[in-house]
Image (cartoon, grey):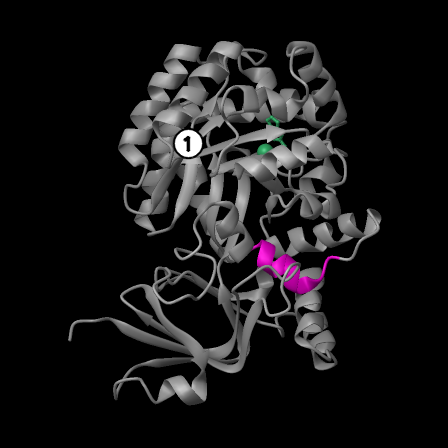
Amino acid sequence: STTDLQAYRGSLLHFLADPAFSDNAHAWHEDGLLIVADGKVRAAGDYATLHATLPAGTMVHDYSGKLLMPGFIDTHIHYPQTDIIASPSAGLLPWLETYTFPAERSFEHPEHAAGVAEFFLDELLRCGTTTAMVYCTVHPQSVDAFFTASEARGLRMVAGKVLMDRNCPEFLRDTAESGARDTEALINRWHNHGRSQYAITPRFAPTSTPEQLHLAGELARAYPDTYIQTHVSENEAECAWVRELFPQSRSYIDVYDSYGMLRPRAMYGHCIWLDDADRRRMAETGAAAAICPTSNLFLGSGLFDFERADQAGMLVALATDVGGGTSFSMLQTMNEAYKVARLKGSHLPALRMFYLATLGAARAMQLEGTIGNFAPGAEADFIVVDPQATPLLQRRSRSVASLEEQLFALALLGDDRAIAATYSGGRQVHVRT
Ligand code: GUN
Ligand code: ZN
């Protein structure tokens, strides 16, 4: 047969349900085997049982002592902000003016965009992130550069051109009509092309006119399997600005709702200053929240309320929000998510955090069965995690008493160094040296 069959031995972890709502949410095989056929998962289970099913002579990659898990999914990140990560500011709005907008200007040059896209993808893969929802800039060529780079590596990526027709520098401005026209052309060029998927991307309500939001909503209806991504209720000054700009709206999320942008595959960054009516509305429409703790602490934006989100039944996932976020690592993102939950009086178990960075994110993106776990037929995007990656992790890992404790130590102490290798579609795309 011409099937490309590969097998990977190690400790297997993946999720079948949300640990916050199910006692049997995860599958764990201490001595496990992952079988990959033609870039897709064929089987995942105990080595002892599955090994016997392999045709004689099948190559078994031995990762014994390491964890094999689905690749991380980052549900909100800005590739054009790679070069301004860790730029201090008094808060979101001055940070946008001082660092973000000038940095995004350079993406009118395709060579600049291509160079940053390569570095950005290297960095994601070094951190074990195999899929991301990515903001490009207002320039259509920034999207072409991004998908050209991600497709060359065979990655599943979601991205889109920022729509922005007011309250921003002239050099970054589109118009309601040109933004919609460019978006539709990019949908036709990239959406469902290979593993690429398009996200209609109004930056946030303050930088779009009502006309632009209206046209974005029309596109979202005309192309119902595209994504939508934007920012909402991140910072108190931003929320006050939105109340001034949209006095007729009940709330910030209601602005997007009134333009038809609450629907499955809509990803809302931050969601900090919501009320319970907003949360209920997100839950009933299938819109999802991208939780960005490193960014929210860095910019002083606020603390996400995990308990209220769960009470409302919202779809939630973790995200870095680089360059407002301070790390590309989903492990570092878990570290700060844990502390945010702690400040809100709740405990976020490590199993839940790993769920939120894998299957939970896939569910928030309506991609369960495609990515996020080792269900048969899923795309073989997975990572090899090393609990002995650093002297401190090695020492701490000696005395962990449970899987939960091991994962917690990885989340709190780990970063790119804990990712021994990254695979996408069954191909190795990163190995730690
Ligand atoms: N709100 C509008 N634009 C942005 C951005 O680029 N980053 C963050 N964190 N918030 C935003
Ligand atoms: Zn953002």
* Residue 411: x %, y % from top left: 67, 61
Q: Going by the image, does 23 lie left or right of 76?
A: right
The quadrant holding residue 149 is top left
Q: Nearer the viewer, residue 98 or 204?
A: 204
Give the residues in magenta.
348-357
Q: Nearer the viewer, residue 11 or 361?
A: 361
Residue to which mark 1 is pinned: 112
* Residue 105: x %, y % from top left: 49, 22
The quadrant holding residue 82 is top right
Q: Regarding mark 1 in the picture, which secondary structure is present there? A: helix
Is any atom of residue 265 visible in this view?
yes
Q: Going by the image, does 87 lie left or right of 76?
A: right
The vertical placement of 401 against 185, above or below, is below
Residue name at image x 57 percent, y 14 percent? 168
Report the residue that reaches farthest toward the left. Answer: 1
Asked if ligand 1 lies within 8 A of label 1, the reply is: no
Magenta-colored stretch includes residue 119: no
Label 1 amino acid?
His
* Residue 132: x %, y % from top left: 48, 45
Q: Main secondary structure of the magenta part?
A: helix
Q: Going by the image, does 67 lie left or right of 232?
A: left
Residue name at image x 77 percent, y 34 percent? 300
The vertical placement of 82 against 48, above or below, is above
The quadrant holding residue 110 is top left
